[in-house]
Amino acid sequence: MAELNLILLGPPGAGKGTQATRLTEDFRLPHIATGDILRAAVSAQTALGKEAKRYMDGGELVPDSVITGVILDRVAQDDARDGFLLDGFPRTVEQADSLGTEIEKRGRRLTAALLVDAPDDVVVKRISGRRVNPQTGRVYHVDFDPPRLAGRDDDDGSELVQRDDDREETVRRRLAVYHAQTEPLIDYYDRRGLLRRFDGTASPSEVHSHIRAAISTLQREDEL
Ligand code: AP5
């Protein structure tokens, strides 16, 4: 079967992480989430984590020079040989160029950039109710996608937490950064014929079934 090399794009809170959890189970792909990688580095207090924290807490992007090498190394690991789902990378045109060059060098190509989109007022509401399992990164919402037992993860019972960068003023800054630095990637991938758009305001299961159907179609087209 052809490789599935996928990128998830979209504003903070649009549902990239929520969909990634479901899609990686459907298609057995490693979920490479830059935010999760950086948060793990922050909590382990590694050099990467110490450098990243001051940007993340302010809602700014970590510099390309800090993040790009980490993600390109991750994509080159064995479990991503037959495909990957990148969530949160690339986020700038420079990162997109680096990714394109690197995977081409390895004789691979991107399958699609999946845009999950939602307006600013919707994502601000979502992020304020988000709760996360800090061990696994699984995401919930207190109203829209609650755990079975309040405050506890359905799978391992861990205590759910609120992310440090989910305060409203930081979210507004993250949105401004998204519009300025990441949104140009929509056009970037559209021009390359790779963009697929999904309405992130539908329910999580509707968004999931739309994306899953689109990926299955891409897989079938590749096999013809
Ligand atoms: P990152 O962790 O990647 O954050 P983000 O892109 O801002 O995205 P989020 O995780 O906030 O949202 P999401 O789209 O995954 O939504 P979710 O599924 O959780 O990055 C954090 C920081 O790290 C950045 O600000 C930056 O500093 C740094 N960083 C990361 N990558 C970088 C890079 N490449 N370069 C430089 N810096 C980088 O859903 C949100 C909530 O809504 C949840 O509660 C969920 O349950 C609920 N929900 C989801 N879908 C629905 C739905 N359809 N209906 C109702 N509720 C829903």
Image (cartoon, rainbow, N blue to C red):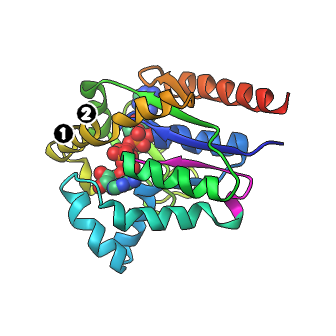
Q: Percent from the top left, x then y, of residue 9?
A: 45, 38
Q: Tell me which amino acid carries mark 1.
A: Arg
Choose between 17 and 65: the one closer to the eye. Answer: 65
What is the spatial separation of the Cα atoms under label 1 and label 2, in whole angstroms? 8 Å
* Residue bearing the label numbered 1: 172
Q: Residues within 10 Å of mark 1 (few under 14, many from 20)?
A: some
Quarter placement of the N terminus: top right
Quarter placement of the C terminus: top right
Choose between 87 and 67: the one closer to the eye. Answer: 67
Q: Are marks 1 and 2 in contact (CB under 8 Å)?
A: yes
Q: Any mark on residue 202, and which?
A: none
The question of residue 188 being in magenta is answered with no
- Magenta range: 79-91
Task: Return the residue found at the far left.
Answer: 169
Q: Secondary structure at mark 2?
A: helix
Visible residue check, residue 118: yes
Q: Secondary structure at mark 1?
A: helix
Point 56% across, 26% down: residue: 205
Point 45% across, 46% down: residue: 139
Badge nearest the viewer, 1 or 2: 1
